[in-house]
Image: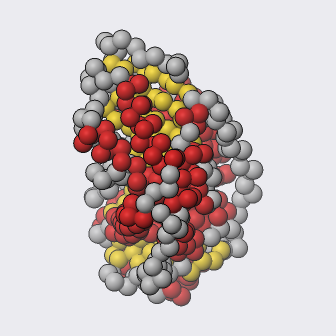
Amino acid sequence: MRKVFGAVALAAFTGCATTQEAQKPETPPAVEAAKVEAPAEQPKLQVPVDYYKLDNGLKVVLSRDSSAPKAVVAVYYNIGFRIEPKDRTGFAHLFEHMMFQGSTNLGKMEFIRLIQKNGGVLNGSTRFDFTNYFEVIPSNALEPILWAEADRMRGLDVTEENLKNQQGVVTNEVKVNVLNQPYGGFPWLDMPQVANTNWYNAHNFYGDLKDLEAASLEDVRAFFKTYYAPSNAALVIVGDFEPEQVKGWIQKYFGPLPTVAQPSKPDISEPRQTKEKRHDKQDKLAQRPALAVGYHMPDVGTPEYFAMALVDEVLLQGNDSALYQQLVQKKGLTGEVSGGVNQLGNHWNYNGPMQWTAYLFHDADTTTETLLAEIDGVVAQLQNQPIDAATLERARVKARSGLYGQLEGFLGFGRADLLASFALFFDDPARINRLETELMKVTPELIQKTAKEYLRRENRTVLTVTPATAPATKTQAP
């Protein structure tokens, strides 16, 4: 997610706005080994969580932090790439742009100006399971920002001019960030399309240009009415505020909005993969070959899901990781190995099928099979015997550090992100305080069991990028 200081970035999956001047809005409110156990004395995460719902279905999470006079306001809508309508690929992303085109009382750019003149920053994004909008502001500007978010939830300025404008913006993004970019879409956009079989998980999330161009004004209005309703949203406020005062503002501005019956969410499940998949992508702009391997993840919330968070640390994260040590330090086959779970977010803020993915770039004289053999050798070490106590403890420390880093990321937005995700997905934002405990429960035996089941070759998708001038890589498994 791109940080925005003074403007909304025109970047992939971030909220975009035009530069056209707008009419003045109505005046807003005034600003005011053996089994290894965790040490019993180890501190546990305790994020304040005050959770309730309005009568119209809006989920509200308040998390007070008076360490600095600032606040994060985040509005999450339960609509993302996975459940956008068929024949309207990229529509969830297109509509994210539309939310910056003006609302009932705020014309074009006025929402952004309201944030900026109060010293705040803002952004938005489209992800697998949600579309979000957030602002980081001085806490004395909280009321007018709540008013503004409620105003665009109440009614969007959906016009033919705005639609055509943003169709052009999104089309240009696709061309700049994917079609005309070396390794465009690798592996974050390419891997789901190859690894998954269910259309909802496997279609082009960025959108085919023909589908983007075919979106009509009626489509946009229907999409807004259905998905951008309080009954399909979560509002999170993190920071320095008086809870009762804020609850009064939320009721005042969001309470009158009507509830909307939500359509049933589509089935996004994936079948168990029983045969390795391979796919080669020819790239006329690439200078070197690339390789990505993706393994289907355990279901969210299972013990194996938490074990994979530690597997990720052991195998992939940091220069001490096993894959980095083997492929970079020992063999010199690449200069870096990257990846993880959820390339568009983090290990925690999604709710559906996902891949754990590792990817790298390499010289043309290094074959895919050489690289896969080395990867398989590293993975086999986890599968063949439980990891030692020191390795497990290091993984736990890294995972806990990463979790705390996410929570504190971007001026406190990271905390709001997880609270909103858990409210939307599980009706349980307090889940945030159980993540660390679940990580500490993971044993060497569970890691070994998880590696055997989920890091199977049959559960793997191999994605290669071949420069168009080079001989094509074999696309069939040997």
Q: Tell me residue 382's x, y (percent).
A: 48, 49
Q: How many labels, in total?
A: 0
The colour scheme used here is: secondary structure
Residue 222 vs 395, above or below: the answer is: above
At 27% from the left and 58% from the top, the residue drawn is 6
Lateral position of residue 121 relative to residue 245, left or right: left
- Quarter-of-image position of residue 234: bottom right
- Quarter-of-image position of residue 470: top left
Front residue of 255 and 452: 452
Is any part of residue 90 visible from this angle? no
Lateral position of residue 366 relative to residue 33, left or right: left
Residue 1 vs 71, above or below: the answer is: above
Is any part of residue 231 visible from this angle? yes
Q: Tell me residue 89's x, y (percent).
A: 57, 34
At 27% from the left and 35% from the top, the residue drawn is 331
Q: Tell me residue 123's x, y (percent).
A: 39, 56
Front residue of 89 and 184: 184
Front residue of 181 and 148: 181
At 39% from the left and 60% from the top, the residue drawn is 391
- Quarter-of-image position of residue 390: bottom left
At 53% from the left and 21% from the top, the residue drawn is 477
Q: Tell me residue 282's x, y (percent).
A: 40, 18
